[in-house]
Amino acid sequence: SYDWIKDTPERSVSIIVDGVSGSGKTYLINKIIPILDKKKNYSKILLISSTSHLSGDFKQIPKKHHYKAERINDVLKNLIQVQMKFIKQKKKPNLNICIILILQDISKARPSLRLNATHIIMFKNNNYNKKRYIIENFLTIDGNKKEGYKLLNQIWNRPFKALIINQWNIQ
């Protein structure tokens, strides 16, 4: 079990949550947001999702901080401009924000998004190509894909289980 208090950095976080509809993404996010916010007291929590504006979910995040996935470039550009303003004022650009990006297929996300995320959470998916993508990009050591498949099958052996990759410790 992942400890969101102990295993989360003392800085802004960027979390990618990947999974098909009904996999548990919404449930997990609604559970971890209060935990993370209590620990960090974020100035903002931004949610980027293709469907959050359609559902009534994520009530703890103000609607003005919900963005459609198509607007991700605008959101990121705005964050960079704010950081640049801090730098020009010779202030440390610690925005203390939490960004949550919800996807249904992480393999279609830009590599820069994946590389800069502090956490990547992937729910069970039975699509062979998606499994292969996850194995090749996240679970293969020394070219041994067999061990990656074995590990993924152990993690995804029950419904609503997710693979959590904590990248902040290795950045």
Image (tube, rainbow, N blue to C red):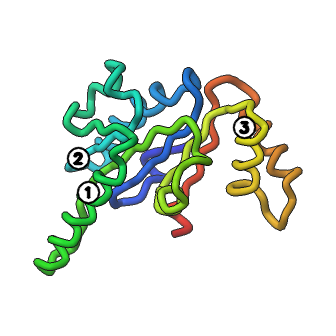
Nearer-N-terminus badge (2/3): 2
- Binning the other alpha carbons within 10 Å of mark 3 as few (below 14), some (14 to 19) or many (20 upward) gives some
Quadrant housing the N terminus:
top right
Q: Looking at the image, which residue is at 58% across and 40% down?
A: 105
Mark carried by residue 58: none
The reply to whether callout 1 and callout 2 are in contact (CB within 8 Å) is yes
Q: What distance separates the C-alpha of mark 2 from that of mark 3?
A: 32 Å
**Of marks 2 and 3, the one in the foreground:** 2
Q: Position of residue 170 (x, y in %)?
A: 56, 67
Secondary structure category for the residue under label 1: loop
Q: Is residue 110 above or below residue 38?
A: below
- Residue for badge 2: 44
Judge from the rendering whether residue 155 lies leftward or rightward of residue 122; answer left or right. right
- Identify residue type, mark 1: Asn
In the displayed orientation, state which residue is furthest to the left.
89
> Is residue 35 among the parts visible in the rendering?
no
Q: Looking at the image, which residue is at 33% across and 45% down?
A: 71
- Residue for badge 3: 155
Q: Position of residue 84 (x, y in %)?
A: 21, 72
Q: Looking at the image, which residue is at 29% across and 51% down?
A: 75
- Identify residue type, mark 2: Lys
Q: How many marks?
A: 3
Q: What distance separates the C-alpha of mark 3 from that of mark 1?
A: 31 Å
Secondary structure category for the residue under label 3: helix
Judge from the rendering whether residue 158 lies leftward or rightward of residue 75; answer left or right. right
Q: Is residue 141 above or below residue 40?
A: below
Nearer-N-terminus badge (3/1): 1
Image quadrant where residue 141 sits: bottom right
- Residue for badge 1: 96
Q: What distance separates the C-alpha of mark 1 from that of mark 2?
A: 7 Å
> Is residue 45 among the parts visible in the rendering?
yes
